[in-house]
């Protein structure tokens, strides 16, 4: 499957979001060609770690959502979000990267690279019963496995 075809499908969807399940940390396969076309790649873990520096630990779960929304709104309109696993952490309230960014994808074009197993219209991160286990519904967005993409 060509990356350009997936992006065209995404651009014609209600939610302008493409979710790519990547367990091999091969984000450069997608990031390099897209940056050459003007997309902005953002390391989500790095950004979130900076955001939480200003939040007292006992207020983290309550305030992190608002901080992420504020930060995200300040970003450009064509984004590749990678290194998203920090969002699954129990300390942050196990945020769902698809849900966290999907509604803004009506205004911005977003490609989210995330770890997890894609099975049908669901992506599972971690193992069931672990504190960071998350299951995400990707039926409303374009989605693919990294290994199925030709950049």
Image: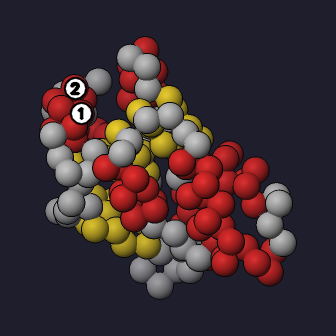
**Residue, disc 1:** 7
Farthest residue, direction bottom = 129
SS for tag 2? Answer: helix
The quarter of the rendered structure image containing the N terminus is top left
The residue depicted at 55 percent of the width and 39 percent of the height is 75
**Residue 19 visible somewhere in the drawing:** no
The residue depicted at 43 percent of the width and 73 percent of the height is 134
Its colouring scheme is secondary structure
**Residue 33 visible somewhere in the drawing:** yes
Q: Nearer the viewer, residue 63 or 5?
A: 63
Query: Quick one: label 2, few (<14), some, or many (20+) residues within 10 Å?
Result: few
Q: Nearer the viewer, residue 119 or 15?
A: 15
The image's mark for residue 4 is 2
The image's mark for residue 50 is none
SS for tag 1? Answer: helix
1 left or right of 50?
left
Q: Residue 111 occupies which quadrant of the picture?
A: top left
Percent across and percent down for residue 49 are: 73, 54
The residue depicted at 31 percent of the width and 49 percent of the height is 106
Callout 2 touching callout 1 (CB < 8 Å): yes
Classify 57 as above or below 52: below
Classify 115 as above or below 127: above
The residue depicted at 83 percent of the width and 60 percent of the height is 54
60 left or right of 27?
right
- C-alpha gap between disc 2 and disc 1: 5 Å
Percent across and percent down for residue 5 are: 16, 30
């Amino acid at each position: 499957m060509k990356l350009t075809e997936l992006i065209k499908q995404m651009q014609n969807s209600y939610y302008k979001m493409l979710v790519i399940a990547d367990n091999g940390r091969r984000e450069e396969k997608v990031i390099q060609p897209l940056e050459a076309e003007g997309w902005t790649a953002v390391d989500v873990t790095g950004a979130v770690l900076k955001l939480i520096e200003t939040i007292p630990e006992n207020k983290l779960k309550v305030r992190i959502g608002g901080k992420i929304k504020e930060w995200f709104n300040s970003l450009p309109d064509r984004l590749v979000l990678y290194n998203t696993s920090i969002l699954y952490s129990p300390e942050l309230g196990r945020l769902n990267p698809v849900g966290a960014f999907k509604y803004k994808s009506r205004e911005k074009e977003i490609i989210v690279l995330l770890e997890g197993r894609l099975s049908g219209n669901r992506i599972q991160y971690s193992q069931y019963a672990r504190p960071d286990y998350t299951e995400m519904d990707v039926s409303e967005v374009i989605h693919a496995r990294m290994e199925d993409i030709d950049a």
